[in-house]
Amino acid sequence: MYLLQVDFKMEGPFGEEMANSFQELARSINNEEGVIWKIWTENEETKESGGVYLFQTKESAEKYLTMHTARLTSFGIRDIRGKIFKVNEALSTINHAPIK
């Protein structure tokens, strides 16, 4: 399994307004190839947003990152940071990671 971490500067919305505004987008992510789950991240104070995703394969994480970066860029978002990491399942399981 592979973890994708994405973050970027964003003026908003945040909190409940974000949850209401992006429900359709959140549902569509479930249909992306290889996605197991996503945790949405936000920091209204620093105007940052993003997410942490778990993918079945490195290839599906790379494909999603390419598509998502293009989508965010089309919204006018710049300085998008995306990193992909292999998950150490043995150690993560010890710390109750939701990977199984």
Image (tube, rainbow, N blue to C red):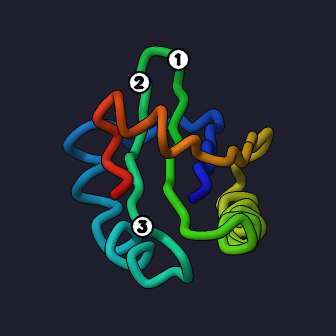
- Asked if the residue at tag 2 contacts the one at tag 1, i.e. Cβ–Cβ closer than 8 Å, the answer is yes
Is 77 located above or below residue 90 in the figure?
Answer: below
Q: Which mark, residue 36? A: 3
Helix, strand or loop for disc 1 = loop
Q: Within the image, what quadrant is residue 61 found in?
A: bottom right
| Residue 83, image x, y percentages | 73, 43
Label 1 vs label 2: CA separation? 6 Å
| Residue 53, image x, y percentages | 50, 53
Label 3 vs label 2: CA separation? 26 Å
Looking at the image, is mark 3 or mark 2 earlier in the sequence?
3
Q: Which residue is mark 1?
A: 46
In-image side of 88 versus 23 (left or right): right
| Residue 18, image x, y percentages | 32, 48
Of marks 1 and 3, the one in the foreground: 3
Q: Residues within 10 Å of mark 2 (few under 14, many from 20)?
A: some
Label 1 vs label 3: CA separation? 28 Å
Q: Which mark, residue 44? A: 2
The residue positioned 44% from the left and 15% from the top of the image is 45
Q: What residue type is disc 1 on? A: Thr
The quadrant of the rendering that contains the C terminus is bottom left
In-image side of 68 versus 78 (left or right): left
Towards the viewer: 50 or 56: 56
